[in-house]
Structure formats: structure tokens, C-alpha cells
Image: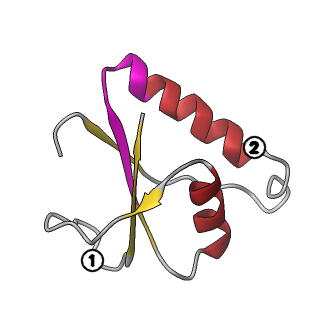
Amino acid sequence: MKDTAELQKLYLTGSAKGSGLGYEMIDFIEDKMREAGYKASYLETHNNLQAAIHIYEKKGYKEIVRPKEVVHSTMNRFFMKNL
């Protein structure tokens, strides 16, 4: 996946959840990806992480078919977004 950055390890403390900080962090990270010349953002997550999936979908990530080169074998949901 040339020209694609991977969004990994985005965690919020319990007290930060629901504050909008997750959305702000993704905006910041995507800006840095664009500045670095990336054209797309990819992420892997798990079906158990419904709150995270909700945020990713609201930020414009679209679910894709499992790529052949998946590194994290426990992940079962895969998303991509054009930057």
C-alpha cells in the first residue's frame, strides 16, 4: 500500500472519552500524514471496539476487505480513508 500511512494505537483514558479528543487527535494525525506526502490512511481494529469504529466511520473511514499483508492477526476489521 504505497503512499498509505497506518493509524495505530489510538487510546484515550476513560475521563477523555466522549470529550471529542479522539476526533481532534485523528484530525491532527491526518494533517501530519498529508504533510508527509501520504495519500491515504489505513487502520486495523477489532469488532469489540465499537466506540472506536464509530469514530473512524464518522471521520470518513470506509471498511475494506482484509488485506493480504495484515500484520496484527487478532484484528478483524479494516478501514481506509483517502486523504
The magenta segment:
33-43
Say if the magenta span includes residue 25: no
SS class, disc 1: loop
Say if the magenta span includes residue 37: yes
Residue 83's label in the rendered image is: none
Above or below — where is 30 with respect to 46? above
Q: Amino acid at mark 2?
A: Leu
The residue at the point 85 percent across, 57 percent down is: 15
Q: Position of residue 19 (x, y in %)?
A: 85, 49
Q: Residues within 10 Å of mark 2 (few under 14, many from 20)?
A: few
Q: CA distance from mark 2 to mark 1?
A: 28 Å
Earlier sequence position, callout 2 versus callout 1: 2
Q: Residues within 10 Å of mark 1 (few under 14, many from 20)?
A: few
**Left or right, residue 41 beside residue 51:** left
Above or below — where is 62 with respect to 66? above
**Left or right, residue 51 beside residue 77:** right
Q: Quadrant of residue 36?
A: top left
The residue at the point 41 percent across, 28 percent down is: 33
Q: Quadrant of residue 5?
A: top left
SS class, disc 2: helix
Tell me whether the residue at label 2 lies in contact with that at label 1, contact meaning CB atoms closer than 8 angstroms: no
Q: Quadrant of residue 44?
A: bottom left
Q: Which residue is mark 2?
A: 21
**Left or right, residue 35 beside residue 59:** left
Q: Position of residue 7 (x, y in %)?
A: 42, 47
Q: Amino acid at mark 1?
A: Ser
Q: Which residue is mark 1?
A: 73
Q: Nearer the viewer, residue 45 or 78?
A: 78
Above or below — where is 78 with respect to 5? below
